[in-house]
Image: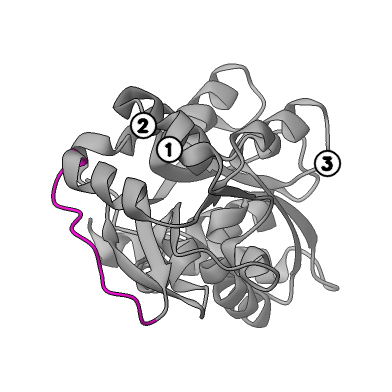
Amino acid sequence: MQYFPMMKKVTALLLLASVSSLSGAELRLLSAEVMKPALRELIADFEKTTGHRITVIYDSAGKVRSRFLAGEPADAIIVQLPVAEDLASTGKVMADSVQVLSRSGLGLGVRRGMPHPDLSSAEAVKQTLLAASSLAYPDPARGAASGILFLSIIRKMGITAELESKTRFTQGSLVDFAQQQQTDVAVTQPAEILAAPSYDFAGWLPDELQDYKNFTWATAVATSTSEPHAAEAFVHFLTSPLAIRAFIAKGMRAAPK
């Protein structure tokens, strides 16, 4: 990724955004909840630089898509890249505004202080799950991308019934879940695990269990926005070197070139 040309573009957009309204724009962002740890810091930087204000509505990736399609107001969204591309093809977001932010996948966390299990293969992961006394993962029924993928994995492994009695579904972030309950093992995106103080991040699941295409996160400007300059500046700000470092520090991976 060529940072210098991107930074010049981002700087120009930020300057444009900062003078687009004397009082500052009010932007509304619909975002997959896994982005929350990084966005908390990045939004503060953007607001300080431009004088704009951003309200973020977090939800599962599936619900972000459905809420946006149902007409919920938003100036920008953060969803999986295939979803953003589909929204661009139907004119819901500006096609030339789609920007890839980072790549994620599934990781495994253990209750703080527990030994880290072997995650080197699908079979090793299977044995780890069977040996765990309790397990948490995002509820697939609420459209959580991590939960949908993990459910498909354990179904292929043929261990759904064995895990059922010891499974607890998280209805929001793992941080929120851990304030009320504790499990020996949690499976979700690494950013969620790293943000939860009561869990240690044991590692990423092996590549054979990942679906990186559907865990590549992207942002785009809604065609219905009334603040196109500010929204575009924000979207491009999220692809700056500062933002990329923030995503990586919070448990994401740099998106492939």
Which residue is rendered at x = 47% and y = 30% of the image? Answer: 161
- Quadrant in the rendering for residue 115: bottom left
CA neighbours of label 3 inside 10 A, class few (<14), some (14 to 19), many (20+): some
Q: Is residue 119 left or right of residue 246?
A: left
Foreground residue, 165 or 19? Answer: 165
Residue 237 image position (x, y, % from top left): 50, 63
Between the residue at mark 2 and the residue at mark 1, the CA separation in whole angstroms equals 5 Å
Which residue is rendered at x = 39% and y = 64% of the image? Answer: 109
CA neighbours of label 2 inside 10 A, class few (<14), some (14 to 19), many (20+): some
- Magenta stretch bounds: 113-122
- Quadrant in the rendering for residue 244: bottom left
Q: Which residue is mark 1?
A: 150
Q: Is residue 105 something that shows in the picture? A: no
Instruction: For mark 1, give the secondary structure.
Output: helix
Instruction: For mark 2, give the secondary structure.
Output: helix
Residue 201 sits inside the magenta stretch: no
Q: Where is the C terminus found, in terms of image quarters?
A: top left
- Label 1 vs 3, first from the N-terminus: 3
- Amino acid carrying label 2: it is Ile
Q: Which residue is mark 3?
A: 73
Q: Main secondary structure of the magenta part?
A: loop
Q: Is residue 99 something that shows in the picture? A: yes
Which residue is rendered at x = 39% and y = 61% of the image? Answer: 190
Looking at the picture, does residue 45 appear above or below residue 218? below
Looking at the picture, does residue 252 appear above or below residue 19? above
Residue 44 image position (x, y, % from top left): 64, 78
- The reply to whether discs 2 and 1 touch (Cβ–Cβ < 8 Å) is yes
Residue 153's label in the rendered image is 2
Residue 22 image position (x, y, % from top left): 83, 72
